[in-house]
Image (cartoon, helix red, strand yellow):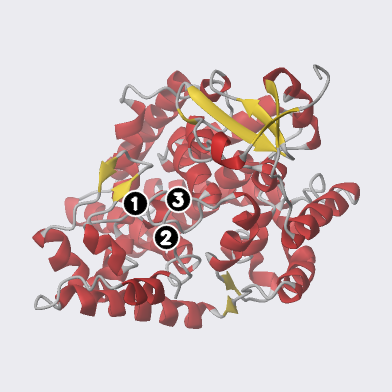
């Protein structure tokens, strides 16, 4: 009958998985987001990576309740005939609903204001140390303070990218503009582009850009096969140069982290001056120009070149703390190839993340991201609430026999270096460069 629901199977849905023909399913209803992809506030990559799949859990994680009303105009009239919900997903959705009713997504606390105030104070201290002091030790101290300023600014940029840290969207964008582009020199547009892909495909070797560091690092020997990055749209070639660097990656890890900021600047410029479409290009470029005006001017106020070099390298090295932390959260966790599919989205988030245990007074230092799993499951939740929900997430993982790993900062470093060393030793084995039996690959892919 005409009034009956029109149905398609999950396999038929998978055929609509490319730009211009992009369908997704949410709670069994099928939506055509082909045209909407370019307007999506989270960018088109988030939709392209989930094309042809049921994305209910991901949609709940990244969108407030007000977003549901926008789906009607995208509805195709089709329903999934084989739509099923796992028990894990049912519990996750129930938990998200309960947190929303408690208002946890709205209770931001005063962390943002404290962080902004600390940034202002630190910036003032940096200016005083450079402009008003002649001592080399004052200049060195200013470099350390500037590094910590960049770390805290990055946390504000991260928070404002996930949820509104300010009262209005306009002020929230201003916070992103100042804390991200203008103060750190890293484009919030670049961050959103990569970070959304990372969240949706956490620890997927071929979809998560946060694991794709060839030729410098490889977290799994599957990279030896020169796999294709679906994020960058090119093959990650494991050539002799990559083999050399990866063979020593457990030794080079910390030195590279000390200058990792340079790569972020390069990636920012590559995106801003590319042909890729993204929101607020002019605003992002303006913010970057502001940074590359005040920072060189500040450095030029230091009396001689040796001190200038020391100042820049020290400030960069301090931010290595944050770069290392981001790696600790994922490098030693389980990895996989492909995309999380429908009901296993929750499981992929738990297997691909590690928490860092610390006292509550250290939460400011980690920016809330020591609760990495909690953040991945509820990315819109203000960091001030993550410690509160951590026991509930642990209980849910225990109920469904899923990974919940919380390590000390030291333990997380040990796990990460051990993982890098194991892959490095495999890369050195030139006599047997890439074992390819299925059992070996399964063991090394899933931990």
Mark 3–mark 2 contact, CB under 8 Å?
Answer: no
SS under mark 1: helix
Earlier in the chain: of badge 1 and badge 3, it is 3
Q: Give whichever of 135, 236 is nearer the camera.
A: 236
Graded by Cα atoms within 10 Å as few (under 14), some (14 to 19) or many (20 or more), the crowding at tag 1 reads: many
Query: Where in the figure is residue 226, as x and y percent of width and height?
Result: 22, 55
Left or right of 309 in this view: 291: right
Graded by Cα atoms within 10 Å as few (under 14), some (14 to 19) or many (20 or more), the crowding at tag 2 reads: some
Q: In this rendering, is residue 56 above or below 237?
A: above
Q: Nearer the viewer, mark 3 or mark 2?
A: 2
What numbered label is drawn on residue 27? none
Q: CA distance from mark 1 to mark 3?
A: 19 Å
Q: Quadrant of residue 287?
A: top left
Q: Which residue is located at x 61 percent, y 29 percent?
A: 173
Query: Where in the figure is residue 228, as x and y percent of width and height?
Result: 29, 48
Earlier in the chain: of badge 2 and badge 1, it is 1
Q: Which residue is mark 1?
A: 261
Q: Give whichever of 304, 17 is nearer the camera.
A: 17
Q: Which residue is mark 3?
A: 126
Q: Which residue is located at x 23 percent, y 63 percent?
A: 224
Q: Quadrant of residue 89?
A: bottom right
Query: Where in the figure is residue 94, as x and y percent of width and height?
Result: 83, 54
Q: Which residue is mark 2?
A: 323
Earlier in the chain: of badge 3 and badge 2, it is 3
SS under mark 3: helix
Q: CA distance from mark 2 to mark 1?
A: 8 Å
Q: CA distance from mark 3 to mark 2?
A: 22 Å
Mark 2–mark 1 contact, CB under 8 Å?
Answer: yes
Confirm whether residue 310 shows in the render.
yes
């Amino acid at each position: 009958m005409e009034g009956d629901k029109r149905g398609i199977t999950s396999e038929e849905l998978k055929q609509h998985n490319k730009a211009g023909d992009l369908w997704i399913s949410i709670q069994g209803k099928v939506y055509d987001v082909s045209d909407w992809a370019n307007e999506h506030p989270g960018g088109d990559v988030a939709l392209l990576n989930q094309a042809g799949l049921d994305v209910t859990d991901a949609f709940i994680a990244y969108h407030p309740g007000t977003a549901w009303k926008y789906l009607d105009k995208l509805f195709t009239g089709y329903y999934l005939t084989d739509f099923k919900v796992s028990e894990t997903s049912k519990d996750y959705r129930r938990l998200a609903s309960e947190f929303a009713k408690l208002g946890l997504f709205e209770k931001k606390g005063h962390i943002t204001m404290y962080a902004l105030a600390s940034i202002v104070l630190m910036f003032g201290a940096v200016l005083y140390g450079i402009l008003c002091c002649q001592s080399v030790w004052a200049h060195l101290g200013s470099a350390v303070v500037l590094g910590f300023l960049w770390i805290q600014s990055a946390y504000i940029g991260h928070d404002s990218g996930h949820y509104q840290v300010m009262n209005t969207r306009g002020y929230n964008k201003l916070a992103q503009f100042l804390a991200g582009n203008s103060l750190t020199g890293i484009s919030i547009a670049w961050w959103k582009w990569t970070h959304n892909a990372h969240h949706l495909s956490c620890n997927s070797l071929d979809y998560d850009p946060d694991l794709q560091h060839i030729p410098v690092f490889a977290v799994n020997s599957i990279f030896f096969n020169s796999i294709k990055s679906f994020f960058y749209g090119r093959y990650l070639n494991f050539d002799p140069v990559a083999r050399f660097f990866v063979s020593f990656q457990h030794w080079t890890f910390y030195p590279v982290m000390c200058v990792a900021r340079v790569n972020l600047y390069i990636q920012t410029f590559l995106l801003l001056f590319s042909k890729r479409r993204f929101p607020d290009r002019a605003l992002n470029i303006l913010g970057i120009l502001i940074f590359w005006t005040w920072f060189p001017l500040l450095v030029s106020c230091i009396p001689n070149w040796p001190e200038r070099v020391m100042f820049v390298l020290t400030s960069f090295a301090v931010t290595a703390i944050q770069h290392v932390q981001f790696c600790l959260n994922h490098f030693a966790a389980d990895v996989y190839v492909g995309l999380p599919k429908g009901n296993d989205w929750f499981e992929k988030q738990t297997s691909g993340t590690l928490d860092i245990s610390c006292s509550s007074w250290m939460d400011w230092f980690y920016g809330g991201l020591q609760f990495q799993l909690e953040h991945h499951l509820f990315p819109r939740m203000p960091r001030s609430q993550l410690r509160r929900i951590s026991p509930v997430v642990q209980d849910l993982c225990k109920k469904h026999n899923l990974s919940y790993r919380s390590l000390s900062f030291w333990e997380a470093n040990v796990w990460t270096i051990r993982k890098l060393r194991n892959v490095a030793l495999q890369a050195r084995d030139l006599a047997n460069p890439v074992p390819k039996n299925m059992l070996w690959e399964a063991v090394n892919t899933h931990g």
